[in-house]
Amino acid sequence: MVGFIEEFTSDYWLKSINKWIVDLSSIDSDWYEDEILIEFENSDNCCYSTSTAKRTGNESVLLHHLFVYCS
């Protein structure tokens, strides 16, 4: 997945997205708290993270997220 950061920082967006996931997991059985994004690398122009999306049954999908700063 690719996201473009037009305002704020990658740290702000990682925290915001993770809060949304945690909040959703408390009210929606399709979301799980352990699906939060885990940051691996952060530089001046991009941020890389991963997450694991749960699917029906025992399956899950590893997602790669790249946040690119736009100026």
Image (spheres, helix red, strand yellow):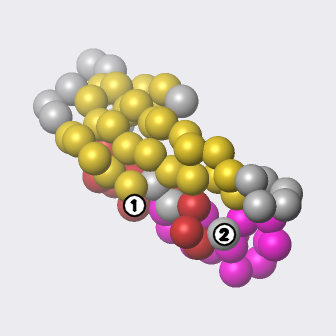
Disc on res. 53: none
Q: Secondary structure at mark 2?
A: loop
Q: Report if the CB atoms under discs 1 and 2 are less than 8 Å apart.
A: no
What's the amino acid at mark 1? Lys
Q: Nearer the viewer, residue 69 or 61?
A: 61
Image: 33 above or below 1:
below
- Residue 29 drawn in magenta: yes
Instruction: Write the residue at 47% across / 30% down.
Output: 3
Residue farthest toward the front in the current orientation of the protein? 58
In the image, taking residue 3 as reference, residue 21 lies left or right, namely: right
Instruction: Write the residue at 49% across / 26% down.
Output: 2
Give the extent of the magenta segment: 18-31
| Residue 58 quadrant | bottom right
Q: Is residue 20 visible?
A: no
Distance (Cα) linking label 1 and label 2: 16 Å
Count the numbered circles shown. 2
Mark 1 sits on what residue? Answer: 15
Q: Position of residue 40 (x, y in %)?
A: 28, 47
Q: Position of residue 63 (x, y in %)?
A: 55, 40
What's the amino acid at mark 2? Tyr
| Residue 41 quadrant | top left
Q: Secondary structure at mark 1?
A: helix
In the image, taking residue 12 as reference, residue 33 lies left or right, namely: right
Q: Earlier in the sequence, mark 1 or mark 2?
A: 1
The quadrant the C terminus occupies is: top left
Q: Position of residue 15 (x, y in %)?
A: 39, 61
Q: Nearer the viewer, residue 41 or 68?
A: 41
- Residue 7 drawn in magenta: no
Mark 2 sits on what residue? Answer: 32
Residue farthest toward the bottom in the current orientation of the protein? 26
